[in-house]
Image: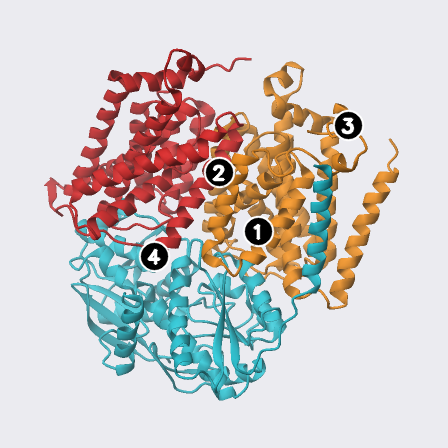
Amino acid sequence: MKKLFVLLLTLALVLGSFAGCGGAAEDAEATEVKIGLNYELTGPVATYGQASVDGIQMAFDEINAAGGINGMQIKSVLLDNKSDSAEATSLATRLMTQDGVVACLGPATSGNFMATIPVATGNGIPVISASATADEGVTMDADGNVNDYVFRLCFNDSFQGVTMANFALNNLTAKSAVLIQDQSSDYAKGLAKNFVETFEAAGGTIVATEGYVKDDKDFNAILTSIAAKDFDVIFLPGYYQEAGLIIKQARELGITAPILGADGFDSEVLLQLAGADALNNVYFSNHYSNLDEDPMVQDFITKFKEKYGADPNAFHALGYDLGMYIADAIERAGSTDSDAIKDALASTENFVGVTGTFSMGADHNPIKSIVVIGLENGVQATSVKVDPK
Amino acid sequence: MKALTKKNLLILGSILLSFAIVQGLIMAGLLNAFYEITLATICINIILAVSLNLVTGFTGQFSLGHAGFMSIGAYVCAIINMEMRSTSGFLLGIFAGAIAAGLVGILIGIPTLRLKGDYLAIATLGMAEIIRVLFLNMEITNGAAGLSGIPRFTNWPWLCLFTVATVVLINNFLHSSPGRACISIREDEIAAESMGINTTKYKVMAFAIGAFFAGTAGALYSSYFYIIQPGRFDFLKSIDILVIVVLGGLGSMTGSIFAAILLAILTTFLQSFTAVRMIVYAALLVIIMIFRPKGLMGTTEINDLFSRRPFFGKKDERIE
Amino acid sequence: MDQFLQQMVNGISLGSIYALIALGYTMVYGIIKLINFAHGDVYMIGAYVGFAATTYAQLGFFAAMVISMVSCALLGIIIERIAYKPLRTSTRIAVLITAIGVSLLLEYVMMFFVGAEVKSYPQLLSQKVFNFGAVQINMQQIYIIATAVALMVLLQYIVHRTKTGKAMRAVSIDPDAAQLMGIKVDRTISITFAIGSAFAGAAGVLVGIYYNSINPLMGIMPGLKAFVAAVFGGIGSIPGAMIGGLSIGVLETLVSGYGNSMYRDAAVFAFLIIILILKPTGLLGKNTREKV
């Protein structure tokens, strides 16, 4: 017994010291290019991570089937950050220093993505997220300097929050609003802040603010107290899992006011949860509309259904564009050097993606237009396009 | 007893040697950044596990709220450190964070430690959830988005220092008279009380010390990983810490240290097998409990393994 | 006033679900003094079994409910046999840790097979809404409350009027003495797990229909809250679990409706701690003295 423990101890020490020395990055062979995927595959926000990865893998499969980038096959290194920001930092470091990736995609949520930024800057390897929407601390640092190696493909919270506030004020002539926000998500908080600021600055009033947390199922209590109040619209920043239930329960309680949301609404699941009858007078901002007759969008939707047997949501579409975007940049860079890729990413002009055509702005945010979609009986019926200033 | 016995010198020497080796490897650039992070995680987990072991393993008070104390240390340190971006701000932050966690530990401990076993577990879980909800709603903690842009001051020398200090201090506490009292509570609370031990006092003491060091770990964590959010300190984080303690052995300091290292290595290997990682963890927990309910090391310490005495030596020489 | 009554309806529907889950907790705790952390996850599995039965097999409400209850009962027995039985003589902490392990195992095995995305039930019950003045109750709420009451009455009957129930009570008071009296302790414990888990399965199906949304991690919070309910009602007491469940449901609804919805979960846990400190045996629990 005693000997066994001593043996184990020695073994652990030896393993530990070897682990410390070994594992230097292999030289990337010219036939493949490694791209790191650092996503939330387990834990509380696994849904978003898994959806993003599905989109990215679909893009990579297509590119590889078509001969790869400049003759090189894409090899993705997929790791799970457990929805934990410390783990995200650790994985980004591993991907960059050990797996020898040329760029890292993800994580999906702002907080986890931000945790990888210092690593990217330190190693000089670009990180790109398709869905980190936080206004501050993502592409710019606290002093207002652009983080050279950090890019994103989505609007930030202020663009969506302001757009929806203006939509409520101008298109719906709303004077008063109720806010129901996902208290556990930074995405929802950012949207809510920008919506409220714009709405109040234009003379609107916020009648009530209610909160919920992820995975809540019963919203009858807050909705009953809201139903007794007088207001024009409900702004509901959050994701479809809860938004679907809130819309359903609100309509059941006889609340008919317009309900506004953001790209977190974009999912087939919203319809499944709320039911077609409840999805009237619901508006949300999004990157693209299913109504879009652009063959690229329709083609994506068809191919996605074939591959995964379900309709794509915003995370899938953004993930797909992300995969295409990085491949495009590597191709234009003409090399697998991370700095060349970074420059190619930054100088992207008129990239045509499923989520819209965009150019990369000087602040590493994409300049792309936003679509406000109106639902009737659960079907996208109207769409209003808003261009960035 | 003399402080500088041969044994103590040997321990001190080996600590200094391992510190120097790792530091040398880092300075020579041989230890890559990923392993450095793994090393930091190991150190932080050791502090967390050893401090939880004091409460759960040695004093026998089952706590499921360790992540709550960790979050207090993390937030306090981050807030101070973001105002004072210097090493002194960092040290002040750690100290303030640890003290804050310790004070909350006393506040929570006094009412809840009257409870026993399962009830205590669920009460501490509830307390940690309340702390998390408060952080989620407070202005200064920036709600769900958490604090980002925390300067990184935690590095290997500091981690090493704090980890060694935690282990030594808790070990010394266990060998002191209050420490013995804590162990007697685990063995039999009623018997301990009838021997004249103020059980509530010692339980709260162990709880507060555990919370203090959990706060320290949280502070180091916040200063190493740039960003903290309330969601990172949920019920599952408490479970993570518990898994380390249980795997190593409830009542074995050495066990906690080994388990922290072992789990970090396991995690690294399983990083590529994403889907099964959590399943493996969960299954591991169940299997260990069924086949070795006392954990890998039980209550055995490393000294017991190397001592010349028989395995179950004189009672007063070891803590079981 | 109307709003208050409406909130009570909301609270009671929510509370009925907590009560159904709490019944399982209270029975298991009553008999082997274990907080079965995996209970919330059995409820999750129940919801998925119901989902499969209604979506793929196109079964109706009652058939889905029965299938889910039977599957959960089996699952409960298997969990007990594999994970808890070998530990019956171990420390309470060891068993509790095992329970946590089983809970994580169920969650992540399920996530492995069905993914993290939420799934929605087909429409099974009518959406009919009954109006009583300004207060409205829908068909699903009536089903939930009725099922909860019916199952509780059934359970009271089993525990107090049948031989099996008598055996359960005997084992819960003193397993060793019960064994000496010729009661098959293992079998009785298995039956207890089966019944408790079956109730969780029923709750799972009801939640699936009522809220129309299920996911692999859905059991964590309701599980914890149902435990709070069981403690509040007096753990080991069946009417206690019912009263506790309803109270927690109403408390949550009132905090959300009239207080600050952001502090709802904190309020439930604060309530638990206050109960534990002031009256650890709960409303209807029996006082036990610790003997040396």
Residues marked 2 and 3, same chain: yes
> Marks 2 and 1, Cα distance to the nearest angstrom?
19 Å
Which amino acid, by three-letter code, is at mark 2? Leu
> Marks 2 and 3, Cα distance to the nearest angstrom?
35 Å
Q: Where does the image place residue B127, in percent across and percent down from the top left?
A: 49, 38
Question: In the rendered image, which residue does mark 4 sit on?
Answer: C117
* In the image: residue A235, left or right of residue A24: left
Disc 3 to disc 1: CB gap under 8 Å: no
User: Is disc 3 surrounded by few (<14), some (14 to 19) or many (20+) residues within 10 Å?
Assistant: few
The residue at the point 52 percent across, 35 percent down is B290
Q: Where does the image place residue A119, in percent across and percent down from the top left?
A: 59, 68
Q: Where does the image place residue C50, in percent across and percent down from the top left?
A: 24, 45
Residues marked 1 and 4, same chain: no
Which chain is rendered cyan in the image?
Answer: A
Colour given to chain C in the rendered image: red
Q: Is residue B178 above or below residue A35?
A: above
Image quarter in which the N terminus of chain B is found: top right
Kindly report which numbered mark, 2 or 3, lies closer to the viewer in this rendering: 3
Question: In the rendered image, which residue does mark 2 sit on?
Answer: B125
Which chain is rendered orange in the image?
Answer: B
Disc 4 to disc 3: CB gap under 8 Å: no
Is label 4 in a helix, a strand or a loop? Answer: loop
Question: In the rendered image, which residue does mark 3 sit on?
Answer: B317
The residue at the point 59 percent across, 33 percent down is B294
Question: In the rendered image, which residue does mark 1 sit on?
Answer: B75
What colour scheme has been applied to the protein in the rendered image?
Answer: by chain
Instruction: Give the quadrant of residue C236.
Output: top left
Q: Label 4 lies in what chain? A: C
> Marks 4 and 2, Cα distance to the nearest angstrom?
27 Å
Q: Is residue A19 above or below residue C178?
A: below
Give the tally of numbered discs.
4
